[in-house]
Amino acid sequence: MKLKFSKMHGLGNDFMVIDGVRQSVSLSLEQIRQLGNRQLGIGFDQLLLVEPPREPGHDFRYRIFNNDGGEVEQCGNGARCFAKFVCDEGLTDKRRIAVETARGVIAPEYLGAGQARVDMGVPRFAPADIPFLADGEALRYPLELDGGVCQISVASMGNPHAVQLVDDVDTAPVERVGPLVENHPRFPERVNAGFMQIVNRGEIRLRVYERGAGETLACGTGACAAVVCGIRLGLLDARVIVHARGGDIVIEWAGEGHPVIMTGPAATVFQGEIEL
């Protein structure tokens, strides 16, 4: 099987993007792992598969696989690359598209010049929606880790996030604590672990240890989750610049019941063809 693909990234969060509209694509778990291997394959944080929609009125279906082969519900940086890809490839003449994901429909818009805006939908905070095992909903929860306790806020952006405040993301124990949070038994489907440093009310620094991928240079849904948790805690304003290790994106949220809007870059690195 030969596959044409594009290699793309959003703030260094990198993707293999495959057109499943004009070519037949069927990948096994092992094949995805092989493609994701940075020494023996293409290498990526996530594989993005563009498919025809299942429901009328929608433009595409969007499937996301981590480099460990597991399929996940949502990816914000990937959504921006998705929008650029379908426009660049001539799969649509629309700039704003309706895209089906495993957790509902999102509306990315390609703005041109390598910039995209995405309506990421309304965040959810009830423990059952994360999912997270807790007696009730709260702004913060204590989480026991290796004999210590950290304070986390939880949110779903179509995928689960746990956000903790840190004094300095450069010295935060992301590599040690990230896997402990990701695989904590109170998260039945695992979780993305965010480490947020507040610079001021309109600016944060963020590192995210992503479920199934490890720490990435940026995480779009992680940025959304961090900002909405910070706003709910009364620490941030409605528009926030998020500084990730791969660059900056802007997150806007008007509050409970409103969607989160994410704006940032998407870039194509190269195109190729691989035979499996």
Image (cartoon, rainbow, N blue to C red):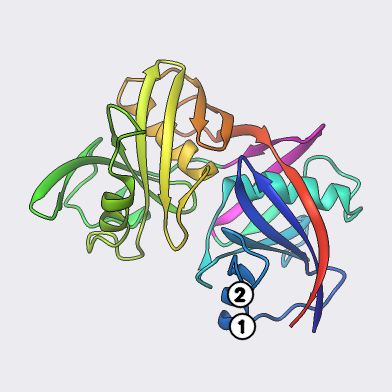
Q: Quadrant of the C terminus?
A: bottom right
Q: Look at mark 1 in the image and give the residue it sits on.
A: 28
What's the residue at 70%, 42% (across, down)?
108
In-image side of 24 versus 248 (left or right): right
Q: Reply yes or no: does residue 109 show up in magenta.
A: yes
Q: Look at mark 2 in the image and give the residue it sits on.
A: 32
In-image side of 194 versus 64 (left or right): left
Check disc 1 and give the amino acid type.
Ser
Q: CA distance from mark 1 to mark 2?
A: 6 Å
**Mark 1 Cα shell of 10 Å, populated few (<14), some (14-19), many (≥20):** few
Image x and y of residue 139, in percent? 25, 35
Nearest the viewer among 22 and 3 is 3
In-image side of 260 versus 200 (left or right): right
Image x and y of residue 129, in percent? 37, 54
Q: Reply yes or no: does residue 165 show up in magenta.
A: no
Check disc 2 and give the amino acid type.
Ile
The dot on residue 232 is none
State whether the magenta stretch is mostly helix, strand or loop: strand
Whether residue 211 can be seen here: yes
Whether residue 98 can be seen here: no
**Mark 2 Cα shell of 10 Å, populated few (<14), some (14-19), many (≥20):** many
What's the residue at 50%, 36% (across, down)?
245
- Label 1: state its secondary structure: loop
Q: Quadrant of the N terminus?
A: bottom right
What's the residue at 71%, 81% (across, down)?
26
- Label 2: state its secondary structure: helix
Image x and y of residue 248, in percent? 57, 29
Question: Extreme front residue here?
Answer: 39
Image x and y of residue 257, in percent? 47, 34
What's the residue at 56%, 58% (across, down)?
45
Magenta range is 103-120
Q: Are marks 1 and 2 in contact (CB under 8 Å)?
A: yes
